[in-house]
Image (tube, helix red, strand yellow):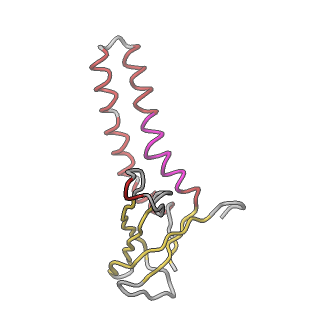
Amino acid sequence: MTVGDKIVTHPGVVKQIDGNKVSVSVISKAGCASCQLKGSCSVGEMEEKVVEMELPRGFSFKEGQMVTVEMKQSLGTIAVLLGYFFPFLVVLFSLILFLNLGIDQGLSGILSLLMLAPYYGLLYLLKDFFATKFQYNLY
């Protein structure tokens, strides 16, 4: 871990243990989810996410047990770049390319959106690589 690399922690509940794999349910809250006015506001949002990871050595967990999941904040930034920013660049640059090639605007837009299929396909093929890079810690 580099100096100054912040750790993000979330409480979670062990959902399932399968051999050396554990599934943990994490409740993700928006910044205003704890606000008293959230019932009359549509901005507040809570979402349940299930995170799968290898069971840490030396630890034993039970289903239903409360745990803490942690991850380096920089990995979250990389995930946002891979999931949102780079696909935006793929669409933008391919649209500019197709328009400069003289292709009709409507067709250029459709082709640019279709360029996302190979991008996300490549991410899918590299999922095992990313699984080794995006490590969660559990305690």
**Closer-to-camera residue (96/70):** 70
- Residue 80 drawn above or below residue 8: above
Q: Quadrant of residue 102 in the image?
A: top left
Question: Residue shown at 30%/32% (left/top)?
Answer: 114
Q: Is residue 24 left or right of residue 107?
A: right
Question: Residue shown at 45%/26% (left/top)?
Answer: 93
User: Where does the image place residue 40, in percent across and percent down from the top left?
Assistant: 37, 54
Question: Residue shown at 51%/60% (left/top)?
Answer: 133
- Residue 137 drawn above or below residue 120: below
Q: Quadrant of residue 117 in the image?
A: top left
Q: How many marks?
A: 0
Q: In terms of secondary structure, what is the magenta stretch mainly?
A: helix
User: Where does the image place residue 45, in percent across and percent down from the top left?
Assistant: 40, 57
Magenta-highlighted residues = 76-88
Judge whether residue 3 is colored magenta.
no
Judge whether residue 81 is colored magenta.
yes
The residue at the far right in this view is 3
User: Where does the image place residue 13, in percent across and percent down from the top left?
Assistant: 40, 77
Q: Give the quarter of the figure containing the N terminus.
A: bottom right
Question: Residue shown at 54%/69% (left/top)?
Answer: 9
User: Where does the image place residue 51, in percent across and percent down from the top left?
Assistant: 40, 68
